[in-house]
Image (cartoon, rainbow, N blue to C red):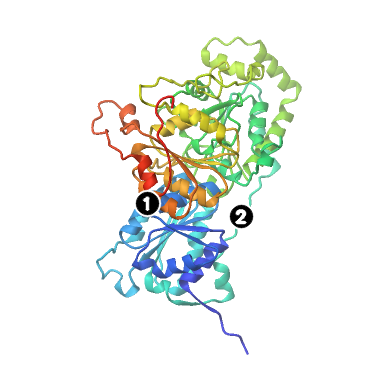
Amino acid sequence: QLSPTPEQRVAEFIAESLVSQGVTAVYGGHGGSVIPLINAIASHDKLRWVYCRNEQAASLAASAEAKLTGRLAVCVATSGPGASHLTTGLIDALQDRVPVLAITGMKATRAVDLSEFQAIHQEDLFRAAGLPFSKVVMSEDAVPAMLRNAIAVATREKTAAHLAIPVDIQAKTLRLSPVRRQLGHVAHLDYQSSDTRIHKAAKALADPALRVVIAIGHHSATELADSTPLNLRNPYAPQDAYTRLAETLNAPIVVQLDAKGVVDESHPLYYGVLGIFGNPGLDAARSLVHAADIVLLFGVDRQAVDLISDSDFNQVRRVVEFEPDAGSAASHRWYDCETVVLGELASNARRLEAAVANLRDTPEGRAALQVLEDSRPINAHARQWNWLLRGGWRESAPPVPGTDGDERGHEPPSRFQVDHTEAPGFCHPARVLSPLSRLLRPADVVCVDVGDVTLWSSLCMCLSGGQRVLSSQGMGVMGYALPAAIAASIQRPDQRVVAVAGDGGVQMTIGELATAMQHKCRITLVIFNNNLLGRVHFGFEGVSGDDIISPDFVALVRAYGGGGGHGKGEA
């Protein structure tokens, strides 16, 4: 006699499937069309339901978690405005190439396109936002396959995917055959490049006179998420692969904001954050990039236009690209690459370093180096590169703490310029961010909002290696820092989590203080308050309407049960 096929409610099947993908927390808003699903999530002993005060914060938290962990992150919302509120965070995940799944509720199937209250065509909304996968499930029997497809798109293409499920289907019973049980899990694909591809990349770098820039992106930081303090003291630790490669190539390192902390930023070959978040104060880095021959991209994703193009966005530099998987590399439609190397980024950096060292240790390589030694460049860009390629960075005194709050030192040529002018009654950001850098331990997380604080954080924080920085790199969402900090605190409860925001940005999601308190998140919230939308005011001319008022933030935090204090000037 055959045993009966086991049964399970659709909502419970979804919850189990999320657990099988490594999901531990689900962020979202509540409402009538998601009650069965949220009941299943909240009652599951391996899932944490994080109710957010606004669904936008839920999608931003999910995007931040995915960037921090590299795993699938999930957000949930009810129909109508609940679903539409998710849009900003899902576009953030889409643009920063991190895996997020959004599940939304709908009216019961019999009411679809008949009921008017909180009814929108969600799939049209999210497709218009750019999501490659946004589907509506109209049968309980279709849930396993469609859920599997949504998860596969999100994880393998490193993007946001969406599934809408009517409330009555969530509550229906699903007959679970062995095939259906397996559909809930999507296997992780490992990639490893051949020695032939590594050698091809190395041959492009064989000339010691080649001007190479190494660019590191957030995929490199996510890869190091499991590094421990013990690893960080190991000279062969993964994150040291990038500095060893830079030393062999005499190449400056630049990073995306989300990749700060991957390398020790006191190293003389570290030249800061480039792009929209790093331009001020980094004239030396920009001049090096503009005169470079080739750029090595390690997990930078598609946000590399500033590194490889001229002011008209025409590619003018050669590119060798390193990505962890095919999904990350697939987004590179914006420039041509000489070769693409897939697999573990730090491991491939180490393999590349060994291959380049062997190619350069030849009579031809040594002769090319001697020509470089004998050359006398006549312009500033050429002199700066000649200084680097001859190994001048090795001879300079190591960086020493400055006396004015700039912790990265001043060796020739100067890599950073910070104006420390301070108006009476105001506190220069460096007074906070430089000491903060010294207090952070490996694996601590800094969540940076969008605005002037983004630029100051790029320039004034000097991280020693192993910390994580989370920001809305592509979408540039004001209000990002607090939801991101909530996700970081939930995922790393034993680490320090710091959110850095301006008074304009933080007020866009300030209601999530309640979410943070409800989940006992350990967050230090640093707010720079100048009663202005600073990036608008200082970044453009002829601006009006950018002055704002703010509450007493310390009093507000205390009202939610937290604590804090004010700081002005030297205080």
> Circle 2 sits in a helix, a strand or a loop, which is it?
loop
Can residue 162 be seen? yes
Q: Nearer the viewer, residue 196 or 424?
A: 424
Q: What residue is pinned by disc 2?
A: 189
Where residue 52 appears, as percent x and y from the top left, is 40, 55
Q: Nearer the viewer, residue 230 or 76?
A: 230
Where residue 450 appears, as percent x and y from the top left, is 40, 38
Where residue 396 appears, as percent x and y from the top left, is 63, 16
Q: Is residue 236 left or right of residue 37?
A: right
Between disc 2 and disc 1, the foreground one is 1
Crowd around label 2: few <14 · some 14–19 · many ≥20 (10 Å)? few
Can residue 315 be seen? no
Q: Nearer the viewer, residue 218 or 381?
A: 218
Q: What residue is pinned by disc 1?
A: 56
Q: Is residue 484 left or right of residue 321?
A: left
Q: Quadrant of the C terminus?
A: top left
Q: Nearer the viewer, residue 226 or 321?
A: 226
What's under tag 1, amino acid-wise?
Answer: Gln
Residue drawn at x 69%, y 41% as measured from the top left? 230
Crowd around label 1: few <14 · some 14–19 · many ≥20 (10 Å)? many
Where residue 330 appears, as percent x and y from the top left, is 52, 47
Q: CA distance from mark 2 to mark 1?
A: 31 Å
Residue drawn at x 38%, y 59% as measured from the top left? 29
Residue drawn at x 65%, y 44% as measured from the top left? 228
